[in-house]
Image (spheres, rainbow, N blue to C red):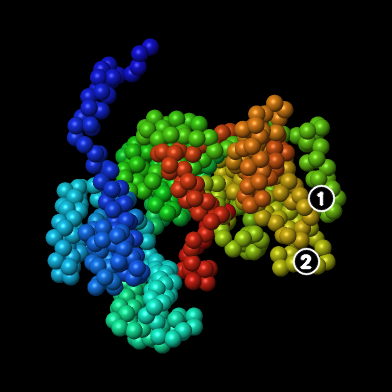
Amino acid sequence: MSGGVPGGDDRHRDGRLHRILRGPRPEAVPTLVARACTIVGLLNVAAGVFPRFRHSRMHAIAEVLPGALGPFAAALALSSGILLLLLAHGLRRHKRRAWRAAVVLLPAGAVAQFTYRHSVIGVVISLALLALLLRHRSEFTALPDPRSRWRALANFVLLGAGSILLGLVIVSAHPGKVIGDPSITERLQHVLYGLFGFEGPVGYYGSTSWTVGFSLGALGMLTALTTIYLAFRPEHPAARLTEDDETRLRALLDRHGARDSLGHFALRRDKGVVFSPSGKAAVTYRVVSGVMLASGDPIGDVEAWPGAIERFMDEAKAHSWTPAVMGCSETGGEVWTRETGLDALELGDEAVVDVADFSLSGRAMRNVRQMVKRIERNGYETRVRRIRDLGEQELAKIQRAADDWRGTDTERGFSMALGRIGDPNDGDCLIATAHKADEEAGPYGDLKAVLHFVPWGKDGVSLDLMRRDRSADPGMNELLIVAALQAAPKLGITRVSLNFAMFRAALARGEKIGAGPVLRAWRGLLVFLSRWFQIESLYKFNAKFRPRWEPRFVVYRSSKDLPRIGFAAMQAEGFVTLALPRFLRRGTTQPRP
């Protein structure tokens, strides 16, 4: 069957011919300008720092580029170079503010070219690049990323540290002009004084002292001005669920929540949400390092998913964010790829246990059965209840214990974590606790372990977090999962979703007889990475309960985006942290995996 739309091949050829005739695609302009800014910025920094560069053939070429102002304006070249390097990333991402800054910087560079060196070629190149920016201004419309004034502190620390290191290079780049043999301490002192505009202990012959002092002063001024700008610019906080958003999402989950086990995790309050025009579907997301990460499938009526997905893609385009979806189902992946033209890649499998089929009997369950019986003989007992059935004091004790038993300083979880325990609106959540009465009771009495499950429709639950006292016997998680599965029928629960196992199929196939060398090598890499990430251990833990495996996918725009998406996902899940130290963070509610 020949493909698709009548006349499709002709239109394809016509479109390709049209692209050839009209020249480079407009979307390539931001990348071209960003690369030019990066090259010019590096050349300018070299011209301002290294005196030998200013007498090299490369500098003769660099002098005709925008912003390269020659040996008599080393400080100005240094400042403009750093600014161009800072602007390059924003221009590549179509950012409007970066475009405005470049439009201001380029004419200033043209004036400086003519004032200092009377370079007509330099002026022409500056104005040509400016004309290119003005002609394609419609390409630079992206809105700002979420931000807060805490970035001013980060800018001061990072740019300040960079200025000190670059200042040390500047101070040491004139060995033939230095008076005496200053120590590294004196050089560092000279840099710190120079950043504030004062003369330091290092002396130079001739005009070099003036050049070094002016360059250090320019670095200090640049650090101060950018920090002041970031401190006083308007905030653009990250998207958060409002009370109205949460109410609408809960209404959608009441009607359609049984379809996806990850649906309830859309109620994390550190996510944003976009609704379809009809309001019958929604996509929740978080923006991390310029990546707009959705998690799971869209919420709501499948027929309305395309409208919500279109709103999601429009929002990503408006901010020039990289769209991506983590952990969607096969149906969700099909809809995402069909509606957006994105690609999908299998990420792993979700372990789902059907309560009616679960039993501790049989050889396959021997290890779990023996572990559970051994722990019970040691005096542990379990309780499985809905959150609404707990008293306030017991709930508060569980909340404190879960927080204190967290294994890392960083809260983990995004796609399969709710981020809270015991919220009044989450009364249907399930809590399984392990208890052991002993003489040396800790601050939480006989409480030794906690498992928290969120609703999955009316007849299912999905595992949210597992926490235990480090002094408790091994096997607490197995004990509580078995307890939850055994108590499920009385609570009207027929299915339980456990942990997500990344690359489960590769691990399973790679250990079988007949696996090829490529598959074995891939499995070996995953096992190696399991030293730092719970890849193999989660797969083996889930496999103990004989689940059925439901594949989950990552949806992405192009393969070159995958490293960036992977890094953003690791940040969102809490495995990589770029935030300020805990004692410097604002007193906001932190997500709890």
Give residue 334's position: percent from left, percent from top: 45, 30
Identified at 64% across, 56% down, the residue is 390
Query: Residue 102: x percent and y percent?
Result: 23, 59
Given the image, on which type of amino acid does mark 1 rest?
Ile
The answer to whether any part of residue 460 appears in the image is: no
Quadrant of the rendered image containing residue 507: top right
Residue 443 drawn above or below residue 192: above
Q: From this view, report whether residue 525 is shown above or below residue 270.
A: above
Tag 1 and tag 2, C-beta contact below 8 Å: no
- How far across and how far down the image is residue 207, in percent? 29, 81
* Residue in view at x 26 percent, y 58 percent: 61
Q: Residues within 10 Å of mark 2 (few under 14, many from 20)?
A: few
Mark 1 — residue? 375
Real-space Cα distance between discs 1 and 2? 18 Å
Callout 2: SS: loop
The answer to which of marks 1 and 2 sits earlier in the sequence is 1
Task: Kindly identify which residue carries mark 2.
Answer: 441
